Image (spheres, grey):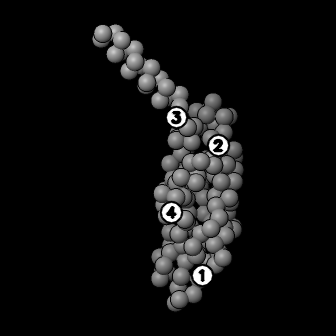
Amino acid sequence: MKKFIFVILMACISFASFAQDKNQAVEVKSTIASGFDKCAMYPGGENGMNTFIHKNIDYPMAAIKSGKEGNVTVQFTVNTDGTVSNVKVVKGLEPNLDAEAIKVVSKMKGWTPAMKGGKAVPMDYQVNCHFAK
C-alpha cells in the first residue's frame, strides 16, 4: 500500500511539474511615478497585468538552454486614451529576453489613464520582469 501511495504521489508531482506553464518563470513587479491624483491602472490592477504578461510571454528557448536568467526592466508611457507607447528597455539582460519583454508590454491595451487635476494625463510606468527557470 505504501508503494502504491508513493507511486501515485510521484505521478502527481511529475504531472504538476510537466503541466507548469513555461511562463511561471516570469515574475512581474511594477514601479509607478508619484504626483498624480490617480495613477494609471491596467484592467484588474497588478494581478490583471501579471496575468496578461504570464499568458502572453514566451521565455525564449535559447535563453532557457543557455541558462540565462535575470531581470528585464521595461519603461513605457500610458497615454490619455489608455494605450501604451514609448516602450523601451531600461535595464536589459540579453537581446532576445529584452525583445520579448518589449513585445508583451506593447500588447497591453485598455489602461485607465492617470488623472491629475481632474484631467487624464500621460504617465510613465515601469515593469520589472524576472526571467528564471
The residue type indicated by label 1 comes to Val
The residue type indicated by label 3 comes to Gln
Badge 3 marks a residue whose secondary structure is: loop
Q: Tell which circle, 1 or 2, labels the residue nearer the N-terminal end.
A: 2
Where does the image place residue 74, in percent across and percent down from the top left? 60, 58
Badge 4 marks a residue whose secondary structure is: loop
Q: Is residue 120 visible?
A: yes
Spatial CA distance of label 1 from label 3 is 39 Å
Spatial CA distance of label 2 from label 4 is 22 Å
Residue at x 59% of width, y 48% of height? 55
Mark toward the viewer: 2 or 4: 4
Circles 1 and 2: CB atoms closer than 8 Å: no
- List the single residue furthest toward the bottom: 117
The crowding category of the residue bearing disc 4, from other C-alpha atoms within 10 Å (few below 14, some 14 to 19, many at least 20), is few
Residue at x 63% of width, y 30% of height? 65
Q: Which mark is residue 20?
A: 3
Q: Tell which circle, 4 or 3, labels the residue nearer the N-terminal end.
A: 3
Mark toward the viewer: 1 or 3: 3
The residue indicated by pointer 1 is 121
The residue type indicated by label 2 comes to Asp
